[in-house]
Image: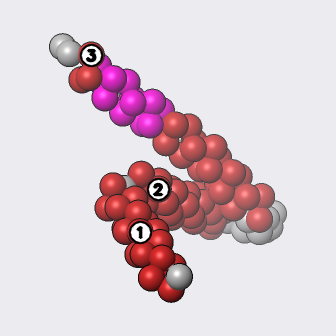
């Protein structure tokens, strides 16, 4: 395998590891907050308590998913060649305009 391909695979592996690490940290934080905020009542039947825990877990996982999607979109925007080309064309347009004004 060529050095280029090895470098690409190393980069992809690194990004996946970073993303998984962020997912675990974010997930633990959100689920922990939801469980801590869960209402506790000793008079509730066990089934209702189990449902409350399940709802708290689900809410935490959904919040984590939203955070990860936002992070992913931001990373894609930051590394997108289209975005970089757009910024470069804006800069060149501004440079041309300022040169024309002089």
Residue at mark 3 to residue at mark 2: CA–CA distance: 25 Å
Residue at mark 2 to residue at mark 1: CA–CA distance: 19 Å
- Secondary structure type for disc 2: helix
| Colour pattern of the rendering | secondary structure
**Of residues 29 and 80, which is closer to you in this image?**
80
Toward the bottom, the furthest residue is: 101
| Residue behind mark 3 | 3
Q: Residue at x 77, y 58 (%)?
A: 36
Q: What span is in magenta?
A: 6-17
- Splitting the image into 4 quarters, where does residue 40 fall? bottom right
Above or below, comparing residue 54 to residue 94 in the picture: above
Q: Position of residue 55 (x, y in %)?
A: 57, 65
Q: Is residue 69 magenta?
A: no
Q: Residue at x 63, y 43 (%)?
A: 25
Q: Is residue 38 visible?
A: yes
The quadrant of the picture occupied by the N terminus is top left
**Of residues 67 and 4, which is closer to you in this image?**
4
| Residue behind mark 2 | 78
- Which one is in front in this view, the residue at disc 2 or the one at disc 1? 1
Mark toward the start of the polypeptide (2 vs 1): 2
Above or below, comparing residue 36 to residue 48 in the picture: above
Q: Residue at x 48, y 76 (%)?
A: 99
In this rendering, position of residue 59 left or right of residue 30: left
- Secondary structure type for disc 1: helix
| Residue behind mark 1 | 92
Above or below, comparing residue 29 to residue 3 in the picture: below
- Secondary structure type for disc 3: helix
Mark toward the start of the polypeptide (3 vs 2): 3
């Amino acid at each position: 395998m060529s050095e280029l391909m090895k470098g690409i695979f190393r980069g992809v592996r690194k990004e996946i590891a970073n993303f998984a690490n962020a997912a675990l940290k974010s997930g633990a934080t959100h689920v922990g907050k939801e469980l801590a905020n869960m209402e506790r009542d000793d008079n509730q039947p066990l089934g209702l308590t189990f449902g409350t825990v399940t709802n708290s877990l689900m809410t935490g996982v959904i919040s984590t998913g939203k955070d990860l999607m936002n992070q992913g979109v931001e990373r894609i925007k930051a590394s997108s060649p289209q975005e970089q080309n757009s910024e470069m064309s804006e800069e060149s347009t501004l440079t041309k305009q300022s040169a024309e004004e002089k």
